Amino acid sequence: MWKMVNDCLQAIDDFVWGVPLMVLILAGGLLLTIRTRGLQVRRLPLALKWMVQNEEGGEGEVSSFGALCTALSATIGTGNIVGVATAVCAGGPGAIFWMVVAAFFGMATKYSEGLLAVKYRVMEAGHALGGPFYYIEQGMRERFGGNFKWLAKLFALFGVCAGLLGIGTITQVNGITSAAQNFFDPNNASTVTIPGIGTYSWVVVIVSALVTIFVALVLIGGIKRISTVAQIVVPFMAVIYIVFALVLVITNITKVPGAFVTVVQAAFNPQAITGGVVGSMIVAMQKGVARGIFSNEAGLGSAPIAAAAAQTKEPVRQGLVSMTGTFIDTIVICTLTGLSIVITGAWQVEGLEGVAVTSYAFENGLPFPARASSLILMLCLVFFAFTTILGWDYYSERCLEYLSGGKMGVVKAYRWLYILAVFVGPYMTVSAVWTIADIFNGLMALPNMIALFALSGIVAKETKAFFEAEKHKV
């Protein structure tokens, strides 16, 4: 019975995250790239400048940089370490090439999401609420007439379910406790039996309790506290990981040209590199594109919820800042992870999968003792997963606020339910829960991409008007 349910859910998950969704998201990114005339290339230097230069005098709850860090807290997660390894092992090194291609078009998508989120957000007494639900409801009504609130509510429902059922809670806290146990108690030597639940390592019990406490302390403070923590932790964790990944690349610099050649060749002729393990270019493309989309969330509609809280007067400006999130998450961090795996040959080591692949790369590629390299990766995993928990709580709370018509009592009750899910997460092993969460996460993209296609003309018009006005200021 349960096997049949799991098989059915897995089939749905494979379909939702299959070729149709990837084609839809890539087509949307291509359309928006054309309509904004390659803005992700032409305006990237300006976007990186504005990323750390907050706008003065704008409405909103947090700074523009704070909104970006809140979004990055959810996108930079275990997928940057574990997901990339899985994609390379399943699709070959060519998956890295297609991951970057997806991110390139995803930058135009993320720009458009951030722009629309600010343009159609609702401000009440200093409280900002916006994201796909508002640009679906208001933007599409403005563009076509009619009532699209049902589509907006559908997105919000998917967002609430995705956050609570695992993307933001169970999978992330499992990643934290597993990483800690693998480092401190890999042989399960110190255990405790919890009546009615099972036997677990003391490391799992202690770490899960600590994570729950820290999560509760942050979430109770709402968006401003989440943003404050994100502005400290996200840059810190991203810089630490990037620095050590760069050290790995630089100390193996003679292997870098060969690694790039391998990646490009494997993107178009994987059999020549993998020895037939990866059957076709389509497989390499599918694994890479899926990882890129899942990692940076461009097109899923989550990041614009955070962008709507930014203190800004200019939708285009916040769109550019939002765009840098995809650049940092995938083109920088995921690419460095992928290069580390290819340079060290970790993807070819039999018997390794998931985080073990990246661990092998760090332990064998960094000029430090293996234990120290393993500690670095474990800490990065912990910080990445912890901030993802915070970011997805904010996303799902804002979705619930929209669904409930602004009833904050419902939102506060949900917040405690979310904290409870974090607490029990390490003791839940039902794979169906994770699959359901994955399905809802993918389903968020459908109403969001419909709106992005429909409102692409508004994105193009706003972009052109903004930069023409900027010319006259000079």
Image (tube, helix red, strand yellow):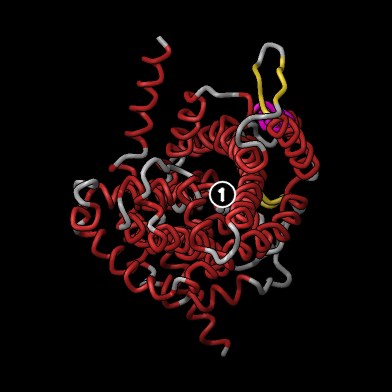
The region drawn magenta spans 414-424
Quadrant in the rendering for residue 192: top right
- Residue 279 at least partly seen: yes
- Amino acid marked by disc 1: Gly
Mark 1 Cα-neighbour bin, 10 Å: few <14, some 14–19, many ≥20: many
Q: Does any portion of residue 407 appear in the rendered image?
A: no
The answer to which image quadrant residue 411 occupies is: top right
Q: Residue at x 74, y 28 (%)?
A: 413
Residue lying at 77% horizontally and 38% vertically, measured from the top left: 210
Q: Which of 128 and 395 is in front in this view?
A: 395
Q: Would you say 455 lies left or right of 211 here?
A: left
- Kindly give the residue lying farthest to the top in the view shown: 1
Residue nearest the viewer, comparing 459 with 190: 190
Residue 288 falls within the magenta-colored stretch: no
Residue at 47 percent across and 23 percent down: it is 432
Name the residue tied to disc 1: 77
- Residue 420's x, y, as percent? 71, 28
Name the main secondary structure of what is drawn in magenta: helix
Image position of 256 with respect to 112: above or below: below
Whole-percent x and y of residue 133? 53, 43
Left or right of 2 on screen, residue 289: left
Q: Is residue 240 above or below residue 379?
A: below
Q: Where is residue 190 in the image (x, y as percent from the top left)?
A: 71, 28
Q: In which quarter of the image is the N terminus?
A: top left
